[in-house]
Image (tube, rainbow, N blue to C red):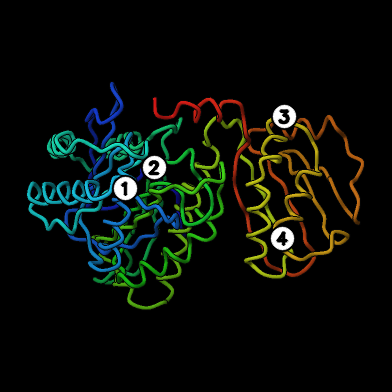
Amino acid sequence: MISKISGGVTAAKGFSAACCAAGIKYQGRTDMAMILSAVPCNVAGTFTTNRVKAAPVLWDSRIVYDVRQAQAVVVNAGIANAATGDEGMALCAQTADFTGKLFGIPADSVLLGSTGVIGPNIPIDKITAGVSAMKETLSDTEEAGTAASKAIMTTDTVNKEFAVEFDLPAAAGGSVTVRLGGMSKGSGMIHPNMCTMLGYVTTDCCISQPLLQKALSAVVPDTFNMISVDGDTSTNDTLLVLSNGQAGNIPILEENESYAVFCEALFSVCRDLAVKMAGDGEGATHLVEMYVKGADTREHARTLARSVVSSSLVKAMIYGKDANCGRILCALGYAGVDFDPKDIELWLNGADGDVCFYQNGRTQDFDEDRALAILSETAVRFTCDMHMGTEEATAWGCDLTYDYVKINGDYRS
């Protein structure tokens, strides 16, 4: 049984975290964070599909795909270290080298993350000073993990962390409790095509690196790849999972029952972090959830659901609390999936009941006041039954408000 617990990246055994105010861009707040494992970890990752990739993405990709082990993560907020050429890669190497020497670990076991404004270079002296300061405050407490999750925020309004625990067979006999927790940041430049944010997940589960990567690649399509805020895929998207094996479970070396439980736990953490990001979109006042069922294939269900939450007209409709189902029908129709409009049903789902928008090829009469009440809820949910098969998918997004334009109209300042 998988149970939610409090905490984030320090929930698992052997992980500590820290943060500091390095003054890289922001003043008067923390803007650097660090995660450290007591021992080397197997590492898995997924990264942005944007052709323009930030220097930390290139650095981390090499570690994940070639080295396959890591022990530390250093992240800064405010400046993205993207479109910085050779200087950006040199900064990564200098940061990793300094951190490695400070902690007595290889430079290629140091993962890096940056988020913020694209273009400017980051002063190396502020980075090294920040790493030195964090070395003195590293802690395995829940508070340290929470503080780290706040330090990596940019336009986020709330920090995002989540953790679970579950039992697996123990190497010494009986069973052992395994923990898995994570943190993420993301509010703008969020659109399906990997994971659209910075995300870090830690676990004390003992699992092989190939299976860790396979598990992560399996859960991303229905979690981080099912969220959209604004249709823009970032240059810095990075999702990393570190496994240090400190729980003492029988090592997961094949796709057995323990592997299935681990995948379920990883899915739970990734889904929660993804939904938190969608609901905290820049300027958002509503989380939007689109559930598509009865599709002929899983990919078609995903495509249809993503099309709805990505639609600017749907987003504007929800902000204005206008029960205009034509916006949703339009987004379904141009998604690129072949279906018969006469066969589908569309519902608005409320906490105290549902409203049928569309059925038998035509819009339905409905109680406008009831629909307005549902559209006023913090989370607005829709269901579309395609009546084509048994596959389903859910996508998450947010409404589009005036504040989104205000935030992005002067982002550099």
> Between tags 2 and 3, which lies in front?
3
Report how far apart the C-alphas of labels 1 and 3 lie in the structure: 40 Å
Residue type of the residue flagged with mark 2: Ser
Query: Residue 272 location, x and y as percent?
Result: 49, 48
Element type at marker 1? loop
Name the residue tied to disc 4.
293
**Amino acid bearing label 4:** Lys
Where residue 308 appears, as percent x and y from the top left, is: 68, 49
Image quadrant in which the C terminus is located: top left
Q: Tag 4 or tag 3, which sits nearer the N-term? A: 4
**Disc 2 target residue:** 6
Occupied quadrant, residue 212: bottom left
Helix, strand or loop at label 3? It is loop
Mark drawn on residue 130 = none
- Mark 3 or mark 2, which is nearer the start of the sequence? 2
Please name the amino acid that badge 3 sits on.
Gly
Q: CA distance from mark 3 to mark 4?
A: 27 Å
Q: Are there few (<14), some (14-19), or many (20+) residues within 10 Å of tag 4?
A: many
Q: Please, what is the three-letter code of the amino acid marked with disc 1?
A: Ala
Mark 3, residue position? 320
Label 1 belongs to which residue? Answer: 11
Depth check: give the residue in front, 120 or 261. Answer: 120
